[in-house]
Amino acid sequence: MKLSGRILWLTEDPALLAGQLAGDDLDLGAATPLHFAVNTDAMISGAACTLGYTGEILGPYFLENFQDTVRKDTIKDGGFQVIVGGDAYGSGSSREVAVVAHQGAGVELVIARSFQRIFQENMVYSGLPFTTDFGVIDRLRAGEAVDLPAFAEQLPPFFKAVAQRGGLLRYGSLLLAGAIEPSYAVDPPKRPQNCVEKIIAMRAWAGPGRPVGINAVSPGDQVLCEAGFRGVHEYTGGMVMALYAQEWGDAPIHNPDLVAAFEDHFVLLDQQTVPLRVKNQRLAPARQLTQEMVEACERSGIRLHGPGRPYPAGVCHRIVVEDYAMPGTIIVLTDSHTPTAGVLNAFAFGVGSTAMAFALRTGMIPVTVPKTVRVLVEGDGRGLVSPKDLILHLIGDPYFRDEQWRESPTDTCVIQLGGPGLDQWNVDELSVLTNMTVEGGLMTGIVEPCAPLREFLSARRGAALDIESTFVYPDPDAAYVRTIAIDLAEVPLTVATPGDSRNRRPLDQVTGTPIHNVVIASCTGGSLADLRAAAEILRGRELSPGVRLTVTPSSAEVSRAAEEEGLLGLFRELGGVVTPPGCGSCIGNGPGIPLDGETTASTTNRNFDRRMGAPGPVYLVSPAVAAASAITGELTDPRALTPARAQR
């Protein structure tokens, strides 16, 4: 590639960005303050994602509203050939359409200080060249023809092999034909391993005709692994099956009993309190994407969850925990919050559409073996410090926020959670910890075997399961890049301030911030435990005048139980909007979308600009803090509330 177009620097300074859009070509260098964590919602919004998944459709919307400066068609029409970003480029969703939007806007090369794991994989599998070498900019400016395929030669062996064979799906066809051997050693010496390493090793493909499993893996290795449960939803299902059909036609899916599709992201768009502008913009194309997924499921024999569908409705991640996840297995969905299922001692992570199409046909998934940080939780939360407080406190720590664990561009990292402090919470509550690891730039989280897992699995899977034999324990002398002991007595009630989930602040530093919109919902904040925690604060009190409250149970099962316990009735009596199960509020597809001038307190997991479907600051909080804030109309410590009046 020779530089025939322009370079766009995604700077922290909106004025510099606006100048470039107006025609200025900046002569900047690697020391330029570049925007931290340009996220996939900024690259392509949830609204634009409903329109389709091709470059032609998405290109005009690339970076629309970024820094409140970019408009539709600005990048595409501006002739920008190279994008330059800062650290953690590609944070957020697993949506492969974020890469497609780059390509549709005419971008041929992405340069950034570091890339997030899913986005980087999607670039490899979609064929978008990228590098962390800022020296390439000087070479391009000097008129040099830069060899883009050479960037693939610098990648780890599996990524390199995929690029050399024309992409992941073509690689999959060769694998199925027996023409591929592993790109990694299949007889490494044994070594002490942590939970994730053990699961990867025992599920690693050893080559054609050989049993699955190898002795050991080490951080940085890239291996193919046997996938267990696999899933898609409406945003991704059509794209996954279109990619599948392009490569394999109507060939059967591998082990379809461990595959499901979920109608959960769009099911609340038609609710009464969703703003009309949102319905007009999103509802019709969302229904089209849903229909694509439904038809693909019917053709391929994939079970379908959703309202009125053969299987129960709810957010995919909650249902996977309720019905599908098993210890020691590898779980993948086309959604970044797949780590939720890591709560059950599984290796669960999000992937893009190409990787999922590969997994559906081959039964395998590529894995870059992550580094592991062990977090040992100790002490008593006193019924006050919640898992939401703990995970916001963790991912906002500079060690995770600044990715101090990273040594190379393709490094990944997970958190392995253990310690006696976990026993005070149930699986609903613990799943918040694994769910939000991805918000800290991590691949996933996994919980070591503990009492809450035993109780949950005994109740949910016990009749057909020898629970103890399924658990994966770390070896006593396993290696970790860091071990962190956390005493819950030292963890403050914590919030994430607007813009990024890693923007941690102790609650007492932002107490008093006016709140107008309270949302208790999502795969992170809509479990039965979450609804109980909120109801405990709200019972006997009233909402502050002018505060809107939206409550969305995360599954049909949660909704039934909350109704039976009187929780949903309590929320309704207070004037709250209680919706059917779904995940719409989190991504601007349901009730709870901020209105003009509103500030939101939400139990969801992501607070990127406009993520919830409209401008307006969003604070991420625990269910108890959300409820207390709904009562006072400002961010509030539940301990500061006066005693509740007796129930009538």
Image (cartoon, helix red, strand yellow):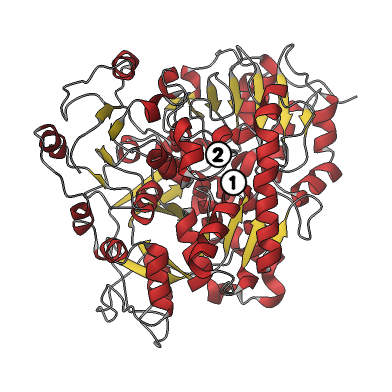
Where residue 283 sits in the image (x, y, percent)? 70, 35
Where residue 4 sits in the image (x, y, percent)? 21, 34
Disc number placed over residue 61 in the picture, else none: none
Instruction: Specify the quadrant that holds the C terminus.
Output: top right
Mark 1–mark 2 Cα distance, whole angstroms, equals 7 Å
The quadrant holding residue 309 is bottom right
Report crowding for label 1: few under 14, some 14 to 19, many 20 or more residues within 10 A (C-alpha).
many
What SS does tag 1 mark? helix
Q: Residue at x 58, y 29 (%)?
A: 612
Residue pointed to by mark 1: 235
What SS does tag 2 mark? helix
Where residue 38 sits in the image (x, y, percent)? 38, 33
Q: Where is 183 relative to 404, above or below? A: below
Q: Where is 5 relative to 456, above or below? A: above
Report crowding for label 2: few under 14, some 14 to 19, many 20 or more residues within 10 A (C-alpha).
many
Q: How many marks?
A: 2
Residue type beneath disc 2 = Cys
Q: Residue at x 31, y 35 (%)?
A: 398
Residue type beneath disc 1 = Tyr
Q: Residue at x 69, y 77 (%)?
A: 464
Q: Is residue 402 left or right of residue 64?
A: left
Residue pointed to by mark 2: 49
- Of residue 346 and residue 585, the one placed in the foreground of this image is 585
The answer to whether the residue labelled 1 contacts the one labelled 2, judged by CB atoms less than 8 Å apart, is yes
Q: Is residue 3 left or right of residue 539?
A: left
Q: Earlier in the sequence, mark 1 or mark 2?
A: 2
